[in-house]
Image (tube, helix red, strand yellow):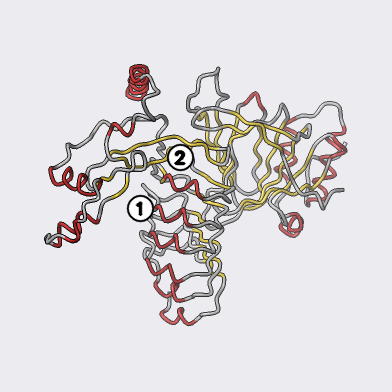
Amino acid sequence: LPKEFDQLINLEKLYLSGNQFKTFPSQICHLTRLRTLYFGGNRLETVPQSIINLKRLEILYLGGNQLTQVPAELGALDCLRALMLCDNKLKIIPVALSKLTKLRSLSLHNNQLTTLPVEIIHLVHLSDLSLRNNPLVFQFIQELEYEVPTLKELSGRIIRNSKIPYRQLPLPQCLVKFLDSARRCPKCRGVYFDTRVKEVKFADFCGKYRLPLLRYLCSPPCQSGNSSDYSSEEEEAAQRQKMQRVLLG
Amino acid sequence: MGEDFATDLDGLIQQLRRIFDEDQVDVDQVIKLLGSYKSNPEDWMKFTKYTRNLVDRGNGKYNLMMLCWGEGQGSGIHDHANSHCFVKMLDGGLKEVMLEWPEGEIEQPMTVKDVNIYKKDQVAYINDSMGLHRMENESHSKHAVSLHLYCPPFGECYNFDERTGHKRKCCVVFHSCHDK
């Protein structure tokens, strides 16, 4: 793309599909009036973060490229109504996409997605969602691996959960940074740092699909459902059965 | 008897009406007729205003519809409500993935039985006894336009979830401002 392309500042529709671009020309991110960008069927490997400048973008077609990820900056394009990411090599999609409240159409088929971020249920106006040909998790699978937490992790959790005012203490910066980085467990409202457990739950979406949604919890006990009301023996047996079915394929 | 040949869309519509006027319709004859028409955008551009456009009601015996497919657009997996379905490619191409009917009540992934590619001017045919299918425009840079004939016409069909075989009723909708 010629360097001078960035001078077409009034351009609203740009169609570059079916070419052989390997890199996303940075000139495009200067075209701030762009409303429609079709860049399908090329060989794009990345999308630049500067795409955030295309604040008026309503339709973005990136299907049929070589993308292994897309930048979280896409989530800042609040005018986006249609986002096509089909036929790429995406393993995950950024949580930030759940901020695209105007999104009506999201195409993710033919990728390598195993789960979707749970926040995707915020896309209440989504009427078209394509997910076929992704290795989406079929059944609830309990995460077997759980690394034993380090002493640092355990101490950090106690400090945060007990709300000890650590910032007032003479601590090395790296420890303060570590303590600041705590994340909340959505189940028990405790915190975790580096040690966490994956939970995949299936949720109904738009009444049409059952999606595997991924979130992180602080520890395996948080995974096993609500509380004392469950007969824990029954539940364990059910979980074991599910595991057998999954392992046996 | 007329010839099973059409040089323009109006001619095609007339020939179809003639063939379907009979009590018995030969599927191969219809396929041959549809295949004989060499697609000319001037004939059909006016029917591409919406995604699904009704072209002719075939005296109540069939629905003739024009479908416009955007880049990467595909349909769900669907059945054909015991009707015959012919698809004539007018522009671009469509990939057809044929699947077996789900068996029994167990939830399990559906089996693909065949994959066909239809290029411009080619004709596809399917009915429920042959299985289910999904149609998709695989191109990321070209639209596709297809002409569909459903006999008898139907207003509802089932949509299937490929991962579980679960089916759900859905309505067939289209725009009919060009109704004859």
Q: Reply above or below: B111 against A62.
A: above
Quadrant housing residue A190:
top left
Q: Quadrant of the C terminus of chain A?
A: top left
Residue at the image position 73 percent from the left and 43 percent from the top:
B173
Q: Earlier in the sequence, mark 2 or mark 1?
A: 1
Name which residue type carries label 1: Thr
Quadrant housing residue B20:
top right
Which numbered disc covers residue A68?
1
| Residue nearer the viewer, B91 or B156 | B156
Residue B24 location (% of width, % of height):
82, 26
Quadrant housing residue A12:
bottom right
The mark total stands at 2
Q: Tell if the residue under mark 2 belongs to the same chain as the one under mark 1.
A: yes
**A156 left or right, relative to A188:** left
Decide: few, some or many residues near mark 2? Use Cα within 10 Å; few <14, some 14-19, many ≥20.
some
Residue at the image position 34 percent from the left and 29 percent from the top:
A224
Check the residue under mark 2 and report the chain it is in: A
* C-alpha separation, residue under disc 2 versus residue under disc 1: 16 Å
Name which residue type carries label 2: Asn
| Residue nearer the viewer, A187 or A94 | A187
Which SS class for mark 1? loop
Residue B152 location (% of width, % of height):
78, 31
Which numbered disc covers residue A133?
2
